[in-house]
Amino acid sequence: MRRASAAVVVVLALSSCTAEGPINPVPGPPIGYASGSRLRARVRSSAPGARQLVGWCDTKLGVDCTFTTAEDGALRCIPGGTEVLFLDELCQKPIAVVSAACGGSGPPAFASTTVLSEETCGGVTRAFRLGDAVDVPNSHAYVGAGASGGCLRTAQLEKDATAYALDPIDPADLVKGTLARAPKSDRLGVEVIVAEDGAQQHRGLYDVATKGRCFSIAGAIGGGDDRCIPNEVAWATYAADPACATPVAYQVRPTSTCPSAGVVVSYGFKGCDVHASFFAPADTVDITDVFTGAAPVCTLVRKQPALFGELQRDHVFYQVGAPVAATTFAPMRSQTTGLGRLAVPILAAADGTELTPPRPDVFFDTTLGVLCRAYVFPDGVKRCVPRDAVPIATPSFSDDACSAEVVGVPQSPGCTAAPVYAVRVTAGPACSTDVAATNIVKLDATPQTLPSYYTVDATGACAKQAQGGVFASITGEVPKTSLAVVVEAVE
């Protein structure tokens, strides 16, 4: 697991929902969910288009919530809100810290955090109500005590942020969900959360024969032949030798509630296509013998103290054993469902039987013929931007006058395909989790290799960057009006 480095703490106040007003449906069929009497679905769509669940509105509490395991061991819809920090070095005194920019009509009413639990794989989520404002000594707080334990000091809090005491919420006050299973084909079924108020949500997939939960390998690695792979998996992304030629697999350390890996997955590109191979896990490997990187830069993990400390705490490593045939796992395919500009991508069994959407933030733009995700634009409108658009955070140029803009494009050995679009990304609205963009551009279909490139530095000068790469020229701007508008509603 990775931890963010200590920095000035800026905590976001996430959106809440309202129990007042009429239900506001978006035209189109619901995919993989149903609203209940207390939990109302937060959805996205085009107009018209298929609706896709992005979360829940708890109309009794007036706040967004997400199903996860609560302290009582039950699945419950846990309120969102601010991140939880701590006043003390043992992470026993929780506080919420809200940025001054998030003030608005007042601080959020709730906060939540995941804490270590020996009873539940992945920890449990603890929810709180915000109480009175409190002083933070020296403007420093602590972060941690999450699913992997630990408590670390943060850097100084944001200057104008306000800290609030937190009062625990009784899990019984939150909507409870139970798991049900619905077989859809001879090999695959859908796991469903059924809430006590009647709401329903697809949680994932399971293998009908083994009864174990599984996931889309194509969705996890970004393409290739799709199979439903058991959730207990180890990834062969480390190595056992100084040339990084002999793979070593890793898994977050298993416990009594988190089973050991049953399969190892190794993946990479073959030309432009992603390919996965499967193996049995073999003997464990001591972390002191594990290498990371790729030839010619391949180093022992123990020579990178920060990474070594993280991996030593919560990971285990395996040798890669005998190959496992892909046919061991149920085949799947991807298709779309729903009418309108934006269709919903959906995982399906080999015979085309619909299963479940792979993720809540991706649509298929039937006009552009690409997968897309919602970005918020400066006019406040959310539009669906091609998912494979290369992000531009800082412009790059091919000349020393910084007049000919180019975009660095990803390349894999043996693949000359170039991305079609790039998106200029920017900071989103204050205290929002929305991904923001200013505009979309089209790229030249023939990238060029440059030994170096240029950027504009903090003084406004055009500065040469020593490391080159593969770049594409910008051929024009994509009008915002040509992108599908994403509609959001609570229904």
Image: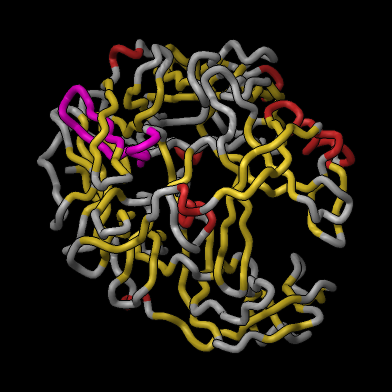
Residue at (58, 50) in percent of width and height: 278
What span is in magenta?
Answer: 191-210
Q: Position of residue 285 (x, y in %)?
A: 78, 34
Q: Position of residue 335 (x, y in %)?
A: 31, 63
Of residue 386 and residue 255, the one placed in the foreground of this image is: 255
Residue at (33, 54) in percent of width and height: 347
* Number of disc labels: 0
Q: Is residue 385 left or right of residue 141?
A: left
- Residue 417 is covered by the magenta coloring: no
Majority secondary structure in the magenta region: strand
Give the vertical position of 336 relative to 83 (above or below). Answer: below
Give the vertical position of 409 relative to 39 (above or below). Answer: below
Q: Position of residue 97 (x, y in %)?
A: 53, 27
Quarter of the rendering containing residue 260: top right
Q: Quadrant of the N terminus?
A: top right
Of residue 148 and residue 100, the one placed in the foreground of this image is: 148
Q: Position of residue 287 (x, y in %)?
A: 80, 34
